[in-house]
Amino acid sequence: MNIPTRITDCPERQMLEYMLDHARAELIDTVRGLSEIESRRRLVPSMTTSIGLVKHAAFAERKWFQHILGRLPESECDGSMAGEASFVVSDQETVADVIAEFERASSRARTIAANIDLDATRQHPACGTVSLRWIYLLMIQEFARHAGHSDILREQTDATRQT
C-alpha cells in the first residue's frame, strides 16, 4: 500500500483531490501484474473480480462526475452507464484496457470538477441534493472500499501462485 504522506496539511479541496487520487491509484495497483485469467477469477460467490472492480469504478466516475456534476446526458458520457452490470468485463477487454478506461474517466472527472466550487450542488434522482464536496467524499469511500475488496482478491490470487 502507498501510504498517503506526501500531502498532510493543505486547503480542503487540495486534500480531497489528493485523497481521491490516492484511492484511485490504490485500486489500480491491486490489478497491476495480474494475468488476464487471474484478474477475472471469481473467488467470492458474487460476480466480483479484480478487473470488474476497476471497470465498475470507471462507471462510478462517469456517473458522478460526467452525468451528475457535469450534467451530461448518459448518452453523452464516454462509456457504459450500465449500473450494477458495470462489473462485467467482456472477453475482448484486457486488464490494460480497463485500467486505461478508468484513468480516462478519472482524468475527465478532474477536468469537470476543476472549476466547480466544493459547495456547488446538483440533484441526484435517489440521493437528492449533493455537493461536489459530498461527491468527492463518496468517491474516496467507494474506491477505498473497492481497493480493499481487490486487495483481498489479490492476496488470495498471490497465495495460489506460491503453492
Image: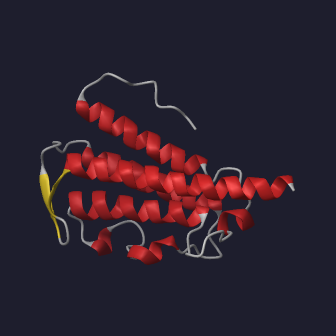
Give the left or right position of residue 69, taking residue 57 as reference.
left
Above or below — where is 45 with respect to 25? below
Where residue 122 appears, as percent x and y from the top left, is: 14, 59
Residue 120 drawn at (x, y percent):
12, 48
Figure quadrant of the N terminus: top right
Q: Is 97 in front, or is 64?
A: 64
Circle count = 0
Q: Quadrant of residue 58?
A: bottom left
Judged from this view, the residue extending furthest toward the top is 9
Residue located 29% across and 23% down the image? 10
Residue drawn at (31%, 75%), measured in percent from left and top? Answer: 75
Is 123 on the left or on the right of 136, as rendered?
left
Residue at the spot x=59%, y=46% of the render? 29
Q: Say left or right for 45 vs 146.
A: right
Q: Percent x, y for residue 71?
A: 20, 63
Say which quadrant the C terminus sits in.
Answer: bottom right
The x and y percentages for residue 110 are: 33, 46
99, 141: nearer the viewer = 141
Please report the residue visible at 51 percent of the width from the left and 32 percent of the height from the top: 3
116 lies left or right of 74:
left
Q: Is residue 6 above or below residue 113?
A: above
Residue 70 visible in this rendered orientation of the protein = no
Res 136 seen here: yes
Question: Which color mode does the image show?
Answer: secondary structure
